Amino acid sequence: MTATTSVAEDARAAPGERGGGRSRPGPWRGRLYRWDLRYSPYAFVAPFLLFFAAFGLFPLLYTGWASLHRVELTSLHHTEWAGAHHYVRLLENDFFWNALRNTFTIGVLSTVPQLLMALGLAHLLHHRLRAATFWRVALLTPYATSVAAATLVFVLLYGRDYGMVNWALGALGIGPVDWQNGTWSSQCAVASIVIWRWTGYNALIYLAAMQAVPDELYESAALDGASRRQQFRHVTVPALRPTILFTVVVSTIGATQLFGEPLLFGGAAGQKGGASHQFQTLGLYLYEQGWFNYHLGRASAVAWTMFLLLLLIAAVGGLVARRRGGDG
Amino acid sequence: MRVRGRTGGGRRAAPVHRAGRHLHGGPLAYAVLSLFALGSLFPLFWTAVTASRDNTRLARTPPPLWFGGDLPHNLVRAWGEAHMGLALFNTVLVAGTVALGTVFFCTIAGFAFARLRFRGRRGLLLLTVGTMMVPPQLGVVPLFLMTARLGWTDQLQSVVLPTLVSAFGVFFMRQYLVEALPAELVEAARVDGANSWRVVWHVVFPAARPAMAVLAMLSFVQAWNDFFWPVIALTQENPTVQVALTGLGRGYVPDQAVIMAGALLGTLPLLLAFALFGRQIVGGIMRGAVKG
């Protein structure tokens, strides 16, 4: 062991003496060159960091500050220390808990079916298919549709009296559902808009990950006599675990922020999330507090509560991932 | 092909199941895919159908399943009632600027993080990645106060500037350049006497072009469809398409035909892009998924 190390060191020392043969540029150009080397990295990251600091980091911290103050939309220049007042009021407020609950249920209703269907679709797309590009483009098209355009069509589809969904249900002998005013029905309707827009996108992400799984893994599984279903469960899904975790995190963040779908699904009083707040999410509650009740300070407290919630979810997710990773 | 060689051998007792990639999709796969494709495309088709009908027809069962003759009339009304022309112009301007800015700033920053040595690099990159998870809601109150104080309410720069760079974009470009831009290439350009900006122009940009295209596309679509902040920062007097649609959808007596005509106008440009560049867009998203 010691012998090999000393030989390696000798070999490394030898070429060092040959170095330094490159001709030096003139003093002025040399200085420019050194400045360029030293400072241009900062010039490259500076625009990004400046914008990032001004429109990302500063607002993030300022929101924390504002959440501890009285800031009213009607008198923007007048602020007053309020301490934990907004947070206390928030925790006492039924509509806040209602919004939190709705965000959770709509989040589960939209994320779980969406990712499961995406996984199944990716599995199908992974086959050798005729018109493969067509299927992929068709499934991705909803991704190009905006929240606003998508929600407005679904409002029409879910109309109580003349909507196509109730018409189709009627043809099957099922009575009309009040998609706007029921609690579960309206939450399912809102979730379905999210599912419609994002399933194909997630399917493509899974497909990309599936294509990156080495063939040898499948071949050895096949030699061990694993059926296609077993291969999917024991080769594909474990190999996709990082991607699945990634989509779960992204979808969870998206679900926590849900805003446009319930806002427009609620029509004229959308910020309330329906007549009895039945689908008001945290994002809508923030908007209502800030821009309808003019309490920007309290809106900031809602924002920071959402942030803390996300950190909690991320921490739990990280723990789960680590434990799972340790087992596998 | 190899699959057929093995399983076609006649020994049905122990069939060898190969990787999904080698298998042809059966009729069931096509049936399920058709169902989902129909589900994906139908609401868009129906947007066009309802945009071509009048309100009395929309308030009758069964709902219309094919086009009527009122499309021009509805489009003219949407154009007039919701500043749809101005909204489209604004949206093209905003999405175009955001896409160009994001690609340029994120590429040079990504290059610096991928290939240049400087003090604080690790920490800054960590900060960038860490804040990728922060939701935009968290900043709206201060952003609103800022735009109000600067007198930018209702002006397009209030929606362009906050989205002109993206932490995801920097991370995405860095990941791509770490693999696609060999350090030797940068070294060689340096030895030839190129300064940093020449390196960026002649070496980095050509190497990064595929990822730049993906990032441009992603940020364009995102900026086009951006909702939360524009609804707060802009008014119906100077809207983007999404803001204009919000105004249409929230009337007390919704004029469905006009709403759907507006929705069609707001979606059509991206749908056309999908029809033309579908393959590239799909490829871009899949590549972004693996690298990102």
Image (cartoon, rainbow, N blue to C red):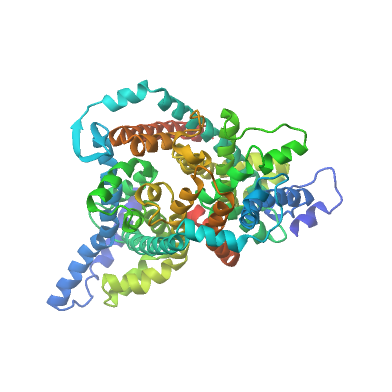
Which is nearer the eye, A320 or A175? A175
Residue lying farthest left? A27
**Residue B180 falls in image quadrant:** bottom left
Q: Residue at x 13, y 76 (%)?
A: A28
The answer to whether A149 appears left or right of A19 in the picture is: right
The answer to whether B167 appears left or right of A206 in the picture is: left
Q: Quadrant of the C terminus of chain A?
A: top right
Which is nearer the eye, A31 or A285? A285
The answer to whether B171 appears left or right of A45 in the picture is: right
Residue A139 placement (x, y as % from top left): 62, 53
Residue B58 placement (x, y as % from top left): 65, 48
Residue lying farthest top? A92
Q: Determine if residue A126 is in view.
A: no
Residue B82 placement (x, y as % from top left): 47, 56
Q: Residue at x 38, y 54 (%)?
A: B171
**Residue A317 falls in image quadrant:** top left
Q: Determine if residue A232 is in view.
A: yes
Which is nearer the eye, A92 or B103? A92
Q: Residue at x 24, y 65 (%)?
A: A40
Numbered-mark total:
0
Which is nearer the eye, A248 or B46? B46
Residue B253 placement (x, y as % from top left): 53, 44
